[in-house]
Amino acid sequence: MFDQKQVSVIKEAVDKHTTKIEEALVKRPERKKEFTTGSGAPVNRYYTPADVSELDYMDDLGLPGQFPFTRGVQPTMYRGQFWTMRMYAGFATAEESNKRYKFLVEQGSGGLSVAFDLPTQIGYDSDHALSEGEVGKVGVAIDSLADMEILFDGIPLDKVSTSMTINAPASVLLAMYIAVAEKQGVSSEKLRGTIQNDILKEYIARGTYIFPTEPSMRLITDIFEFCSKDVPLWNTISISGYHIREAGSTAAQEVGFTLADGIAYVEAAVKAGLNVDDFAPRLSFFFNAHNDLLEEVAKYRAARRLWARIMKERFGATSVKSMQLKFHTQTGGSTLTAQQPENNIVRVAIQTLAAVLGGTQSLHTNSKDEALALPTEDSVRVALRTQQIVAHESGVTEVVDPLAGSYYIEAKTKEIEDAAMAYIKKIDDIGGATKAIDMGYIQSEIMDASYDYQKKVEAGEIIVVGMNKYQIEEEAPKGLLRVDPSVGEMQKQKLVELRAKRDNTKVNETLMTLKKACEGTDNVMPYILEAVKAYATLGEVCGVMREVFGEYQQAVKL
Amino acid sequence: MDKMIRVLVAKPGLDGHDRGAKVIARALRDAGMEVIYTGLRQTPEQIVSAAIQEDVDCVAMSILSGAHNTLLPKVAAMLKAEGADDILVIGGGVIPQEDIPGLKEKGIKEIFTPGTPTQVTIDFIKANVSGK
């Protein structure tokens, strides 16, 4: 971005300056021998135009809303409208969660984000043996369309956008959502929202897989195809780096592994005969926000630039929308401490700034008590207010991509882009993300980074305030949210009633037809829709698919 | 010569958060213990049977799903029923302080909550395994 003559003058000056500083360091050393980012990447003392001299402004940054979208996917960003403040919520029964959603909408939350309990996420009904103790704990329990009707009762589905954190059984929950909307008189073309539907990161980091990789990828491409015709406004996947980072990866690994997963989905869909520009505009991403503010901002910018180039150059996308990396952000759960939980409010505020300065499209802010339990309504309010304060009071929303042009931000953006690209190349050499996961490559890279971090924390090289420094004696926190332990029994009772009330012949018929579709090559979505409309349970639908597809076996490596 | 301590690191329940389990497994191994890691989604039955088959001195369970009050006591009770209650049973994860006394009463010897240095867990195991 600077002419070579200028750069060589600067380089010369920096060399002289460095020599001088280092002489002085003998007497007054810096705080540390090596300075690094939150992810352990080296950080220089300061940055100058010499560190970004290889960048070409129009090619590498461009203008906001223009390729390669380094500066954001829209030309006006938050001057047009703020990001969607989307709080992830759900627990206990559909009735309880429905109340929480109505509370959030009243408080100014712009979209719903549904958390499902683990049995739902793994395709088991609440009365399955493996569901014992888990029903309604980390999210809402959904066993059938009947629960889904209660969950969205009084919430007009043509007005809200709904994000559902559901992966292996995403097809089934999406079908239920479509069926509920139909009952409200809302046609599927009007539905807006997102299903996470990102199975690859489940194998890597999050763990709620059901089926082996191949049929899982087929389910995903079936959803892409079905939605491109019937649910055109729906974001069909949220390719997630969030959980990869939570599992302990670095920022560059978060970008590299997530985009490698993205490449695998695009390749699968293209292989299934879809036209890239028909489905790519509905791909969305999901990233983490950790505490190193500037590294995180650089990370989002790097991800946008890299994805735009991949879509254009590797997949020949021609629609601008296919090249835009749009993303949701969640503040980093693993950065919260159980000690002095009030401090977490500050961490979340820094992470909120990172996401906003990085140009996020939507944001969930964690609550201060989440290292202890599910958040209470009061702590959720503070978390939401944190976003509103950044939006209305901080001033950072008045100008697009305000940190652009900072020598450090631009150098870091490039560095993360290069490091992420190196991971993508390595995964390409292995044969793609699916293979790299089956081999355990991605998992062990993350595990090494996570163990390295833990050792540094324990050695005191990394300070976590309140945890390994500035500790105080604390009393056990009070007023944590408890999920009513009778939820499991309530769900079981509802299932007994459902099975007695519904037309079981019709249920069996729809399940048999679904089975045939799974064995063949038809798109399974219409068959799943028929089954859920007949009130087949989630466990029954997934049970049929388990029979045909089998189950994924995790490679356990230490 | 001291016999090597054998530990089964297990993930009961359905949650997939295995960062803690894996970090503990590596730290115990680096501390000179033999470690067997079960992987995700283990039922109490599977954990107990692995513990007995592998003849471990300690079962260390990591759980973040909120199902700890159901699943951890079940493992302790089943070990007892199998006459294997000399095996040290410990747990870790997102577990509220107020649940800990109840879990201890039911045979979980210690619960390690977020932020515990791995050395604390290592020392606890060394001090509390029964010398078989």
Image (cartoon, coloured by chain):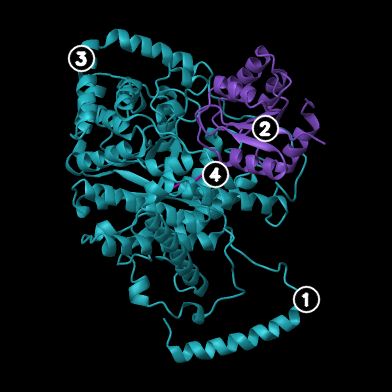
Chain colours: A cyan, B purple
**Marks 3 and 1, Cα distance to the nearest angstrom?**
81 Å
| Magenta residue span | A362-367
Position in image of residue A385 (x %, y %): 50, 46
Same chain? Circles 2 and 1: no
Task: Say what amino acid the circle numbered 1 marks.
Answer: Arg
Callout 3 environment at 10 Å: few (<14), some (14 to 19), or many (20+)?
Answer: some
Pointer 4: what residue? A333
Q: Give the number of the mark in front: 2 or 1.
A: 2
**Marks 2 and 3, Cα distance to the nearest angstrom?**
51 Å
B87 inside magenta stretch: no
Tell me, yes or no, whether the two marked residues, 2 and 3, touch with CB atoms within 8 Å: no
**Marks 2 and 1, Cα distance to the nearest angstrom?**
48 Å
Position in image of residue A165 (x %, y %): 40, 37
Pointer 3: what residue? A506
Task: Say what amino acid the circle numbered 2 marks.
Answer: Val
Sequence-wise, the earlier of marks 1 and 4 is: 1
Above or below residue A307? Residue A446 is above
Residue placed furthest toward the right: B1
Q: Is mark 1 on a helix, strand or loop?
A: loop
Pointer 2: what residue? B7
Same chain? Circles 4 and 3: yes
Residue at 65% x, 36% y: name it: B35
Letter of the chain that mark 3 sits on in the rendering: A
Sequence-wise, the earlier of marks 4 and 3 is: 4
Residue at 51% x, 15% y: name it: A486
Residue at 67% x, 42% y: name it: B29
